[in-house]
Amino acid sequence: MQLIKTNDHMNVLGIESSCDETSVAIIVNGKLAANLISSQDFHAKYGGVVPELSSRAHLQIIIPLIKDALKKSDLELKDIDLICSTAGPGLIGALLVGLTFAKGLSYSLNKPFIPVDHIEGHIYSGFLMNDKPEFPYLTLVVSGGHTLLVLVNSLTEMSILGTTLDDAAGEAFDKVSKMLGFPYPGGPQIQKSAEMGDEDKIDFPVAETKGYDFSFSGLKTAVLRYVQKNYPEKKIPKQDLYDIAASFQEAAVKALTQKTKKAIENYNINSVSLVGGVAANKKLREAFINLSGKYQKKLVIPDLQYCGDNAAMIALRGKTLYDSGKKFGLDYPPYPGFRFEQYH
Ligand code: KG4
Ligand code: ZN
């Protein structure tokens, strides 16, 4: 599948190591030749990602993963023409592994290096699909650390319409999952349990926020209070667990869909896109299918492998930045937090 219209014959390497997934991708002549993802499942027993363990795991797997990706693409290291890596936001020690590796490769191969913003990677991840978003488009980014509603005008221009005032959507799934005693990451656990529950059982609140902003801390606290009040012994029967998960998921999906609906009504857009780890959620995907159908907008939701963290989106974003003439030095630093200034 052609990702980018390209007249050149470039082999682009992408590296992602911002959190608990190490990923390496290679784009050959505009087509994705490899997208390998190694997930650090061992964090589950700690109930969340342990930063130092994450850095060490990235360090151990990055070289074997690059070798495998080269093999899969039928290339050698010397054939790589462009090296892209996530620079932030993320865990600083984890980011350092991929970013420093990319810089080292760039220096030794004497090939250009492009640092990529992880959130921008997600925002444009719809372009990994056959049927691509059409500008201007509205994208809802829902990941473990960020929730953003973004108006994307072109490959270089975008503006944030709304963001979360407190917890990110994925964070809310993870925290509620933890309250219910499920392992990390919580999103898939909540989804699985919710399938066996009644979403109308409990009326959890959907925050009333200004404009296009989101808030999930009230919903999270409502679930906590409900659990504390009804199960002081902390023993929750299975069916009740399922009902709580389903009712929470219903409220979270409603909150995300409601603001997107408002933006569709108020902006002149051609497509709608749903991206990031939480975009894997079946209920949310269904809600977006209904929403885009109602307003007759083209909908692009990446396949599951491109919703969670992956290097394909990093390689793709890096190549577009390179094609737009952007140049970066090897002194480009990793950054932990979200950079609002990139969105004008
Ligand atoms: O984009 P991502 O892989 O990493 C970050 O950039 O943060 O997103 C991870 C988040 C986690 O909070 C995880 O619980 C959530 O995505 N997630 C889901 C599902 N699969 C992953 N949330 C809801 N339903 C899912 N099926
Ligand atoms: Zn992500």
Image (spheres, rainbow, N blue to C red):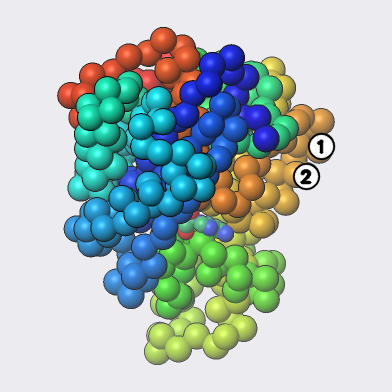
Numbered circle sitting on residue 294: 1
Residue 129, position as x, y percentages in the image = 66, 37
Residue 231: % across, % down = 46, 84
**Residue 306: quarter of image:** top right
Amino acid, disc 1: Lys
Instruction: Give residue 339's quadrant in the image.
Output: top left
Q: How crowded is mark 1: few (under 14 residues within 10 Å), some or many (20 or more)?
A: few
Location of residue 184 in the rendering, given as x and y in whole percent from the top left corner = 41, 68
Q: Is residue 232 toward the left or the right of residue 8 in the image?
A: left
Disc ID at residue 169? none
Q: How crowded is mark 2: few (under 14 residues within 10 Å), some or many (20 or more)?
A: some
- The CA distance from mark 1 to mark 2 is 6 Å
Whether the residues at callouts 1 and 2 have beta carbons within 8 Å, the answer is: yes
x 41%, y 85%: residue: 234
Q: In terms of depth relative to the viewer, which is nearer, 326 or 190?
A: 326
In the displayed structure, would residue 282 be above or below residue 114? below
Residue at mark 2: 290
Q: Residue sitting at 69 percent across and 17 percent down?
A: 268
In-front residue for pair 67/145 = 67
